Image (cartoon, grey):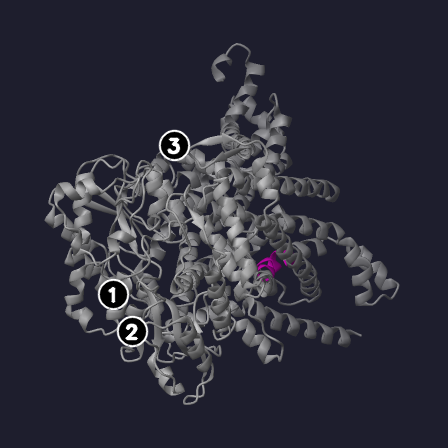
């Protein structure tokens, strides 16, 4: 690339920038463009790694008519939906509380953020004990408050609830940090004006704070959905590749993993991958649109 | 203040980053060496090195048992002994975890990382032509297969791509068996007759029901039974069908296999499991609720589909020799039944060290290897000679354990490492957790498995 | 009025303390159980702050059985190299996109941003097959090589370098310095804060990476911390609470300590990126 540089120094200068970007360009070609192309290509073949047979759309047909795929879609959306439904409002309320007090602000930030720095695998390992139906900390806590307990991870009706608890616990700190950063960015003039009008704290919160946080909530929603669609670590630790009990924890990525790496059905797994990828792509585009609006 | 500090950290980071980037070629090569240094991935066909891939928590050096606190010897012992018997050979062990072992094995085999593999999923690999047929090596060597406990060699028979009949592709090395274990003390406290040596479904259900509730002597909550609702429940179900003189289906090669997952006997078996599930602790569907099993505070009367390792390891450590007893899983009229368990060792078809590899297979049938596995890792011996060892005779329940190893269903269910296994397991879980009734669940499993076979 | 404000403030603080305690209760329980000699035999119940029979036994197990150290070394090695590569690639790339003038710059930058939309899940199987073809499965290579592309890092670096004036470049050019020299001598020394952010973000994502290593690492001696924990947990279920919790403590504690030391910067970095994984 740099071989033709000497003659025209000024325009030749620009080639050097490709050197700066060499690792990135190689990375894009080898680890993004090629694999994504391959994922699409493989989804039209029956393949176990060694041999490949063209099967047109039959993989898609099998995936889209398979009840276990739709079950995994349902599980993925269910967990993400309730995680966001609980974590965003709760995190926002706690962030508002932390923002309103004068002492211990940093202390509380750290405390609530602690779960988020723990790896999800370690967190799931701890929660398999915390959610133990008989000797678990959480049921003990519920019981001592006189609340009904649950069998959590050991029954398909409650297992997703257990995962939601874990993910809320793990994600809450992130929501709080993002909310706090944006709370502190709301112009203080707005509040001062409201003070002059004699608004109470709660009124200010409802009529100034919440409307000003719209962008933040939207951002958290999209980020949360994207991460939720990629859910794997915690459900894998709890229920293995098939998402036990009774496939109630099998998410879309687990489905791909089970078909791809336990059964070596690469074609089926690739078709499911393409479907997942398209959903994520749409959400990310929405995210970029929102980010532009925010900036 | 903080800014300046942060800048310093950043600077150091930046410099380190760029220096590293500059020489990252070398750095990475280092990582590759590291890997091979551990005996991981040397792909050279050095005739002097025998690479053995094992599955499970084996360590090279000694470790401490988490429950008993006793020292457990590592694989070094095996390596040293084999190398002293075969001075020109160096043994390298590669250990992979049980989780995901099928995919791991596949990847290792396709890149030729070992000569010998621990091979619980022998059928799929033999069918792909990746394993060496052992009969010629056995004949050439004159190795006598009678050293093994009955049915152990038969259990691993399978077919290669060119075989018309079942053939030997693996020899037993790591023994294991499945049986019913019970706590005699709980039976006594409840005033229930001990289990008979060959209990049937009715007997187990009846006794489990009797012993669920508040223990009349201790006042503790007791459960009549426990089994894991994860991973392996389907084998208990298949065994229940065997007890009624049926089987999972028939055939050996994928093209010939016919499933009978929805037979009346399977339905009866699953309904029986659903009934028993009433008398188990809540957590059993996620393999929990048995934390007190095999301790002196045990609250579980009958352990269905018990694994040898969990019993043997703890029965002595916890001093439960007089409480825990072993009886057989369900047998058909010919006295056969129950899942064939354990792992054989197989030789990779592309191994360049097949003769040495066979020496190692023979070595694993020696008393030295088998006693090591038995004493250090609570493995069930696979050799006939074991029943004479003093340490085995001392432990009364070993009689039942070894009997269970001698008459399971053989050969091993050919689909037991493939998708139908997971399909059937899901059906069992559906029925046990009340999502579907037994008959519908099994109809679904049958249809799904047939569809899978067809799509293959 | 001021008094009422004070009471509300106190109430909120108390609430936050109680709720905070609930949030970190699993950690407290984890540590308690890890020091309980009897916890391997039976999960301590009802939960208490002080173990029935306090002992270091579980930690001895974790130390003696050794695999946690091997996993630590593996994780440390992979993470260190990955962070170094990611930070370098991002600094170089971000600088080029900020100060460089070359053909295809805009398209290339959009492409880099687009890479952030392609999660590992969408590439899992082809990447696996690719590394399998060149016999690099079950080595650290598949974990390290793909880190040469770091879209988020390039984006953050570009924004950072955009804020630095171009006049510095011109001064360097007059002195006769080439582009690389200008970058290393003039801009890199000013890039401390953004490098710290890159290191923090890249460290957190590499250290916790799970799915991709799960697919490409087969043998136990190459397991990273998350892989080791997952296979330990799946093998033992809830059978040996004491040792499991000692392991969890050992794996969680260093990160927590690091976090407590660097919390301000970590929180800033995360607020800046808006994205963790």
Which residue in the structure is indicated by mark 3? C134
Residue at numbered disc 1: B402
Element at badge 3? Answer: loop
**In the shown orientation, is residue B205 left or right of residue C201?**
left
Local SS, label 2: helix
Report the front residue among A242 and A8: A242
Answer left or right for A98 relative to B210: right
Chain label for disc 3: C
The span from disc 3 to disc 1 (Cα, nearest Å) is: 45 Å
Is label 1 in a helix, a strand or a loop? helix
Q: Nearer the viewer, residue B357 or B261?
A: B261
Give the CA distance from mark 1 to mark 2. Answer: 16 Å
Q: Is residue B9 visible?
A: no
Q: Which of B21 and C133 lies nearest the eye of the viewer?
A: C133
Local packing at callout 3 (Cα closer than 10 Å; few below 14, some 14-19, many 20+) is few
Q: Main secondary structure of the magenta part?
A: helix
Say which of B95 and B134 sits in front: B134
- Residue B315 is tagged as 2
Q: Position of residue A149 (x, y in %)?
A: 59, 74
């Amino acid at each position: 690339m740099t071989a033709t540089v000497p003659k025209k120094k000024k325009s030749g200068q620009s080639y050097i920038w490709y050197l700066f970007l060499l690792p990135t360009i190689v990375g894009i070609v080898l680890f993004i463009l090629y694999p994504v192309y391959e994922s699409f290509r493989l989804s039209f073949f029956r393949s176990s790694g060694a041999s490949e047979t063209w099967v047109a759309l039959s993989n898609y047909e099998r995936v889209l008519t398979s009840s276990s795929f739709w079950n995994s879609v349902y599980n993925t959306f269910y967990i993400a939906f309730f995680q966001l439904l609980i974590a965003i409002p709760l995190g926002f309320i706690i962030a508002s509380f932390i923002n309103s007090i004068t002492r211990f602000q940093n202390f509380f930030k750290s405390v609530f953020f602690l779960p988020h720095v723990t790896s999800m695998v370690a967190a799931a390992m701890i929660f398999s004990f915390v959610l133990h139906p008989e000797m678990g900390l959480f049921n003990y806590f519920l019981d001592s408050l006189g609340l009904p307990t649950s069998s959590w991870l050991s029954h398909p009706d409650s297992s997703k609830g257990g995962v939601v608890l874990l993910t809320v616990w793990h994600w809450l700190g992130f929501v709080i940090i993002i909310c706090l950063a944006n709370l502190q960015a709301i112009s203080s003039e707005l509040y001062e004006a409201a003070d002059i009008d004699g608004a109470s704290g709660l009124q200010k919160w409802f009529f100034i704070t919440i409307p000003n946080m719209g962008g933040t909530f939207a951002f958290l929603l999209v980020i949360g959905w994207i991460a939720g669609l990629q859910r794997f670590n915690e459900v894998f630790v709890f229920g293995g590749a098939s998402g036990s009990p009774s496939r109630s924890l099998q998410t879309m990525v687990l489905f791909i993993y089970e078909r791809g790496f336990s059964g070596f059905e690469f074609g089926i797994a690739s078709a499911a991958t393409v479907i997942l990828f398209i959903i994520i792509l749409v959400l990310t585009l929405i995210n970029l649109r929102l980010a532009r609006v925010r900036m | 203040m903080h800014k300046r500090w942060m800048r310093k950290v950043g600077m150091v980071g930046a410099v380190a980053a760029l220096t590293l980037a500059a020489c990252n070629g070398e750095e990475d090569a280092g990582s590759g060496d590291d890997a091979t240094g551990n005996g991981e991935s040397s792909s050279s066909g050095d005739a002097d090195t025998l690479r053995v891939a094992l599955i499970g928590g084996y360590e090279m050096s000694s470790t401490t048992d988490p429950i008993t606190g006793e020292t457990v010897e590592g694989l070094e012992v095996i390596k040293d002994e084999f190398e002293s018997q075969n001075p020109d050979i160096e043994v390298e062990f590669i250990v992979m975890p049980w989780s995901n072992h099928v995919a791991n094995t596949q990847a290792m085999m396709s890149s030729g990382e070992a000569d010998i593999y621990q091979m619980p999923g022998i059928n799929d690999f033999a069918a792909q032509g990746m394993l060496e047929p052992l009969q010629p090596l056995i004949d050439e060597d004159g190795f006598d297969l009678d050293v093994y406990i009955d049915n152990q060699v038969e259990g691993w028979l399978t077919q290669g791509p060119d075989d018309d009949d079942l053939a030997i592709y693996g020899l037993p090395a790591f023994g294991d068996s499945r049986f019913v274990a019970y706590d005699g003390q709980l039976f006594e406290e409840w005033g229930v007759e001990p289990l008979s040596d060959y209990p049937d479904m009715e007997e187990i259900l009846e006794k489990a029901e009797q012993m669920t509730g508040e223990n009349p002597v201790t006042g503790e909550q007791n459960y009549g039974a426990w089994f894991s609702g994860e991973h392996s429940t389907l084998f208990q179900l298949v065994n229940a069908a065997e007890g009624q003189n049926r089987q999972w289906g028939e055939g050996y090669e994928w093209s010939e296999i016919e499933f009978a997952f929805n037979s009346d006997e399977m339905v009866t078996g699953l309904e029986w499991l659903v009934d028993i599930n009433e008398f188990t602790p809540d957590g059993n569907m996620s393999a929990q609720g048995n934390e007190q099993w095999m301790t002196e505070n045990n609250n579980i009367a009958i352990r269905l589909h018990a694994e040898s390792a969990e019993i043997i390891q703890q029965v002595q450590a916890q001093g439960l020799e007089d409480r825990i007893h072993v009886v057989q899983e369900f047998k058909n009229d010919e006295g056969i039944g129950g899942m064939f368990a354990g792992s054989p060792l197989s030789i990779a078809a592309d191994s360049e060290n097949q003769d040495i590899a066979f020496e190692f297979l023979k070595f694993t049938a020696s008393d030295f290897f088998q006693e090591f596995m038995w004493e250090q890792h609570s493995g069930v011996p696979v050799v006939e000679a074991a029943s004479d060892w003093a340490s085995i005779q001392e432990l009364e329940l070993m009689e039942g354990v070894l009997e269970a190893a001698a008459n399971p269903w053989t050969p091993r269910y050919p689909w037991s490492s493939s998708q139908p296994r997971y399909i059937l397991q899901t059906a069992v879980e559906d029925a046990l957790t009340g999502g579907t009734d037994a008959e519908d669940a099994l109809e679904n499993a049958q249809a799904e498995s047939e569809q899978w076979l067809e799509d293959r | 009025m001021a008094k009422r404000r004070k009471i509300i403030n106190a109430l909120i603080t108390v609430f936050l303390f109680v709720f905070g305690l609930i949030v970190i209760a699993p950690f407290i329980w984890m540590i308690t159980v890890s020091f309980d000699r009897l916890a391997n035999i039976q999960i301590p119940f009802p939960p208490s702050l002080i173990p029935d029979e306090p002992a270091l036994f579980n930690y001895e197990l974790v130390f003696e059985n050794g695999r946690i150290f091997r996993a630590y070394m593996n994780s440390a090695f992979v993470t260190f190299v990955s962070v170094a590569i990611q930070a370098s690639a991002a600094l170089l790339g971000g600088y080029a996109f900020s100060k460089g003038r070359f053909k295809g710059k805009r398209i290339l930058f959009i492409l880099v941003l687009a890479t952030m939309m392609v999660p590992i899940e969408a590439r899992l199987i082809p990447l696996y097959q690719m590394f399998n073809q060149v016999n690099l499965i079950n080595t650290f290579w598949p974990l390290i090589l793909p880190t040469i592309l770091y879209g988020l890092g390039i984006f953050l670096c570009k924004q950072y370098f955009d804020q630095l004036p171009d006049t510095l470049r011109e001064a360097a050019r007059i002195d006769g310095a080439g582009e690389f020299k200008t970058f290393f001598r003039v801009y890199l020394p000013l890039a401390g804060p953004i490098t710290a952010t890159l290191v923090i973000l890249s460290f957190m994502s590499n250290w916790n990476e799970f799915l991709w290593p799960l697919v490409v690492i087969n043998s136990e001696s190459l397991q990273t911390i998350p892989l080791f924990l997952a296979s330990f947990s799946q093998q033992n279920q809830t059978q040996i609470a004491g040792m499991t919790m000692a392991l969890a403590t050992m794996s969680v504690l260093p990160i927590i300590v690091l976090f407590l030391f660097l919390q301000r910067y970590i929180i800033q970095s995360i607020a800046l990126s808006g994205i963790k994984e």
